[in-house]
Image: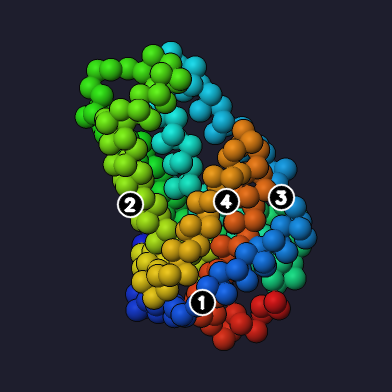
Amino acid sequence: MANFHVLAGPNQKKAVVQPTVRRITIADIFDALRRGLDDFWDKPSHYVFLCLIYPVVGVILITWSSGGNALQLIYPLATGFALLGPLAAIGLYEISRRRELNLDTSWTHALEVRNSPAIPAIIAVGVLLVGLFVAWLLTAQALFNWLYGADVPASITAFVADVLTTERGWTLIILGNLAGFLFAVVVLSTVITFPLLLDRDVGAAAALQTSAQAMITNPVPILLWGLIVAVALFLGSLPLFVGLAIVIPVLGHSTWHLYRKVVETPPAKRRRVQR
């Protein structure tokens, strides 16, 4: 039987060697972005992500036209996309990994993630992120029910006006964004989990622990990275989400280079990396 491992790496009988986390600076964050832009312009992958944007927009439009029964979830759905960002960009990490090894970087290689020996762990962490996304939507709905009770928004215009001009509306804004911030911080602590699993099959537990340690060791740079991601996703969402076709690939490629800066590369692998 194949060695199906999730929490630990393939050598479960051996002690897990925890990857070494480096201290980075704010300059490293911007250098990672520059390298991500280089990867994007080398093999623009925005046309692939157009296929992923439309379903998201479709869900929002369906909600919009649902007769007002779920208008309150439009904002949570739109902002919640950031919680799934690390999973959505996993193919881009693979492209950046191949580019630094001077391998073919055709966009079809993004699909080779499915052949990774760490795919069980990748799926496990992916399920975790989806669970957080669902938990965020349930939290947003529960908060709305607490403040509005059985009052269902009659229209998007009426709902926006109520949110912006009433005490309960401002309470919804403040508490909703506070809850969203907490969910975002949790997901931010997984920022290098997927790149680490693609690069080194250490298991989900070690990857999550290493990513959390990276945030603890580098709180200011990682929080800055989270702010950059949030602003970029917001700006990319403004023109009917089409801007995400560029934003997501650039952020995905940049995340790979952020991983390279944060986690020490073992000597054996270091000799293979050309960039």
- Type of residue at label 1? Thr
- For numbered disc 1, what is the local secondary structure? loop
In the rendered view, tell whether residue 235 sits above or below residue 71: below
- CB atoms of marks 4 and 3 within 8 Å: no
- 68 or 125, nearer to the observer: 68
Decide which of tag 1 and tag 3 comes sooner along the chain: 1
Distance, label 3 to label 2, CA atoms, is 31 Å
Q: Badge 4: how crowded within 10 Å, few (<14), some, or many (20+)? A: some
Q: Quarter of the image containing the N terminus?
A: bottom left
Distance, label 1 to label 2, CA atoms, is 24 Å
Question: Looking at the image, which residue is at 50% across and 77% down?
Answer: 24
- Tag shown at residue 182: 2
Q: Quarter of the image containing the C terminus?
A: bottom right
In the rendered view, tell whether residue 22 sits above or below residue 83: below
Q: Nearer the viewer, mark 4 or mark 3?
A: 4
Distance, label 1 to label 3, CA atoms, is 28 Å
- Tag shown at residue 45: 3
Question: Looking at the image, which residue is at 34% across and 75% down?
Answer: 13
Could you tell me residue 250's position as x and y percent? 64, 56
- CB atoms of marks 4 and 2 within 8 Å: no
Decide which of tag 1 and tag 2 comes sooner along the chain: 1
Q: Nearer the viewer, mark 1 or mark 3?
A: 1
Question: Looking at the image, which residue is at 48% across and 21% down?
Answer: 64
Count of number-bearing discs: 4
- Type of residue at label 3? Ser
Q: Badge 3: how crowded within 10 Å, few (<14), some, or many (20+)? A: many
Could you tell me residue 166's position as x and y percent? 30, 27
Q: Which quadrant holds residue 113?
A: bottom right
Q: Which residue is mark 4?
A: 232
Q: Badge 1: how crowded within 10 Å, few (<14), some, or many (20+)? A: some
